[in-house]
Image: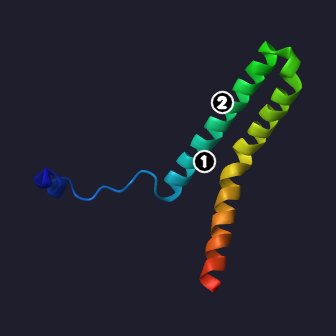
């Protein structure tokens, strides 16, 4: 298989650069939107627990939008703090 690796060369990961950032953001948002939709479906199926399930769905929808930028911001902030000492 090494002759094939030499022929093709080193392959870059598709999760690098701007494309990778967009793919990760879209994947996180998609997953959290699905979780929110499951909460809404359970709220329709179980009216007694509708209020907490609707609140959980709302939180999931908000997190779908802000979780990735927040995680990136926190990671960058920690790396700056670590480099200072």
The answer to which image quadrant residue 41 occupies is top right
Total labels drawn? 2
Q: Residue at x 67, y 37 (%)?
A: 32
Identify residue for label 2. 34
Q: In the image, is 63 to the left or to the right of 24?
A: right
Name the residue located 66 percent from the left edge and 78 percent from the top edge.
81
Distance, label 1 to label 2, CA atoms, is: 14 Å
Can you say which quadrant of the picture contains the C terminus? bottom right
Compared to residue 47, the image places residue 39 above or below, namely: below
Q: Residue furthest left?
A: 3
Q: Is residue 74 left or right of residue 23?
A: right
**10 Å crowding of disc 1: few (<14), some (14-19), many (20+):** some
Q: Give yes or no for contact between labels 1 and 2 (Cβ–Cβ under 8 Å).
A: no
Residue neighbourhood size for the residue with mark 2, other residues' Cα within 10 Å, grouped as few (<14), some (14–19), many (≥20): some
Q: Residue 8 location in percent, x, y?
A: 20, 53
In this rendering, position of residue 77 left or right of residue 24: right
Mark positioned earlier in the residue sequence (1 or 2): 1
- Which is more toward the observer, 44 or 73? 44
Residue 30 image point, x, y percent: 62, 36
Disc marking residue 25? 1
Q: Residue at x 85, y 22 (%)?
A: 49
Query: Which residue occupies the foreground of this view, 17 or 38?
Result: 38
Q: Secondary structure at mark 2?
A: helix
Against 75, residue 81 (above or below) is below
Is 34 left, or right, of 53 in this rendering? left
- Relative image position of residue 16 (x, y in whole percent): 46, 57
In front: label 1 or label 2: 2
Q: Quadrant of residue 61?
A: top right
């Amino acid at each position: 298989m090494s002759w094939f690796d030499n022929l093709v060369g080193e392959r870059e990961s598709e999760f690098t650069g701007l494309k990778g950032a967009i793919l990760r953001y879209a994947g996180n948002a998609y997953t959290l939107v699905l979780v929110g939709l499951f909460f809404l479906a359970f709220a329709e199926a179980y009216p007694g627990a509708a209020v907490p399930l609707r609140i959980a769905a709302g939180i999931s929808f908000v997190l779908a939008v802000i979780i990735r930028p927040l995680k990136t911001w926190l990671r960058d902030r920690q790396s700056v703090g670590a480099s200072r000492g």
